[in-house]
Image (spheres, rainbow, N blue to C red):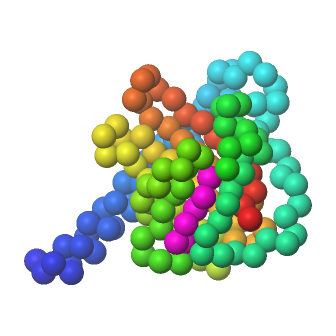
Amino acid sequence: MSEKENSKKTKMTIIKVMSFLLIITFIAVVSFYKGGGVDEPIERDILYMDLPDNKFFIMNNDLSCEIIYSSNENSVGTVIGLLDLNTKNPQMLGSLGGKAPISKLFEDENIIVVGMIAYSSGASDIFHVDKNNGHFARSEGGMAFGTYAYGSTGICK
């Protein structure tokens, strides 16, 4: 098998694995909410919260994304950078300044989905960004120190 074919096969495998993990994370988050794992009603309704209008949003190569609602209340107000989205090597800039490579999992004229899986733990962090209004949904999950899953929504600028 040529190096080009091998690279393409590896990318397809990564996309399939990340898509599978995204689905599992979504199911875990929904099950957590429906199963009564969250005590405060506002947290159970996170999936249905309306985000503020973002009418001046323009999709760019670099976005600054602020978490407005989250099942992890410590995340509310956190700003995360999604960088180099128009390239083959996008990156995430964390709130503490560290950069990490992310993969572009899906993109069409309305949405871009980017994310990463930590090689050391298998934890995942996936962003779905609406390219028309800058609203995003984020799912995080893993088992590093016990099973966990968080869901967040917010606005990119």
The quadrant the C terminus occupies is: bottom right
Q: Is residue 27 left or right of residue 152?
A: left
**Residue 27 vertical position relative to residue 42 in the rendered view, above or below:** below
Front residue of this view, candidates 57 and 3:
57
Q: Position of residue 104 (x, y in %)?
A: 47, 67
Front residue of this view, candidates 147 and 102:
102
**Residue 79 vertical position relative to residue 123 in the rendered view, above or below:** below
Q: Is residue 24 left or right of residue 153?
A: left
Front residue of this view, candidates 149 and 102:
102
x 56%, y 44%: residue: 96
x 85%, y 50%: residue: 50
x 42%, y 23%: residue: 145
Magenta highlight range: 80-85
Q: Is residue 101 visible to the viewer in this orientation of the structure?
A: yes
The quadrant the N terminus occupies is: bottom left
Q: Position of residue 6 (x, y in %)?
A: 19, 73
Q: Position of residue 9 (x, y in %)?
A: 25, 70
Front residue of this view, candidates 59 and 39:
59
Q: Is residue 90 left or right of residue 4?
A: right
x 78%, y 22%: residue: 40
**Residue 142 vertical position relative to residue 38 in the rendered view, above or below:** below
Q: Is residue 23 visible to the viewer in this orientation of the structure?
A: no
Q: Main secondary structure of the magenta part?
A: strand
Q: Quadrant of residue 19?
A: bottom left
Report if residue 90 lies within the magenta region. Answer: no
Count of numbered circles on the image: 0
Q: Quadrant of residue 120?
A: top left
Q: Is residue 116 left or right of residue 29?
A: left
Outermost residue toward the top? 39
Q: Position of residue 54 (x, y in %)?
A: 85, 64
